[in-house]
Image: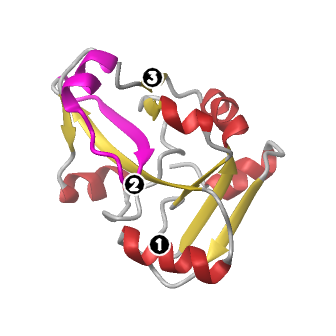
Amino acid sequence: MVNLEDFLRKHSIYFELYHHDPIYTNEAAVIMKEEKGFTGTETKALFLKGKSGKYYSFVTFTTKRTNFKRLKQVVGEKVAVVKEDEMESVTSQRAGAVTPLGYENTIPIIVDEELFKQEKLVFAPARPDQTMVILVKDLREMIDLLENELFIYSEN
């Protein structure tokens, strides 16, 4: 895993970083966001595994249900959410605080295309006691610099 704070500083990419008590639920994240006073679209990251054994990171809205049949069409293989113990073993992250970015370049990133219409994205940077905010306009550049393959998920 890449330390996103160091990575973003190194590449002079704008971000906001908030420190707080550990958060593992969307409800707690909304409360903390109100307390800290920052803005942006709340996201969730799903750590997925394909039938081939390949891992993927999928970032979408916290409130959006995932269409796994559509995901299969997007990435070309059936995928499922990785079980918690396997995800923790592979990524050293805990469920509820999974980052969408910062993985080794063998792990493709799948981004919900609707996120590109937002201004800022809010997510846990692989730590339950931190929240990161980035500008959507920088997302593709970040993925390119991290050298992850990018898939765009759409409902159509």
The image quadrant that residue 75 belongs to is top left
Residue at 34% over, 46% down: 64
Secondary element at image label 2: loop
Q: Which residue is mark 3?
A: 151
Badge 3 crowding class, 10 Å Cα cut-off, few under 14, some 14 to 19, many 20 or more, is: some
Where 45 falls versus 21 (above or below)?
A: above
Instruction: Answer left or right for 30 relative to 48.
Output: right
Tell which of 103 and 135 is nearer to you: 135
Q: Say if 24 sits above or below 55 in the image.
A: below
Q: CA distance from mark 3 to mark 1?
A: 27 Å
Q: Which numbered disc, 3 or 1, marks the residue closer to the eye? A: 1
Q: What amino acid is at disc 2?
A: Thr
Q: Residue at x 17, y 52 (%)?
A: 83
Q: Are marks 2 and 1 in contact (CB under 8 Å)?
A: yes
Q: Which mark is residue 29?
A: 1
User: Looking at the picture, how far across and down is residue 41, in whole percent?
Assistant: 56, 54
N-terminal of the two: label 2 or label 3? 2
Across and down, in percent, residue 59 comes to 43, 42
Residue 62, label in figure: 2
Circle 3: residue type: Phe
Q: Mark 2 or 1 closer to N-term?
A: 1
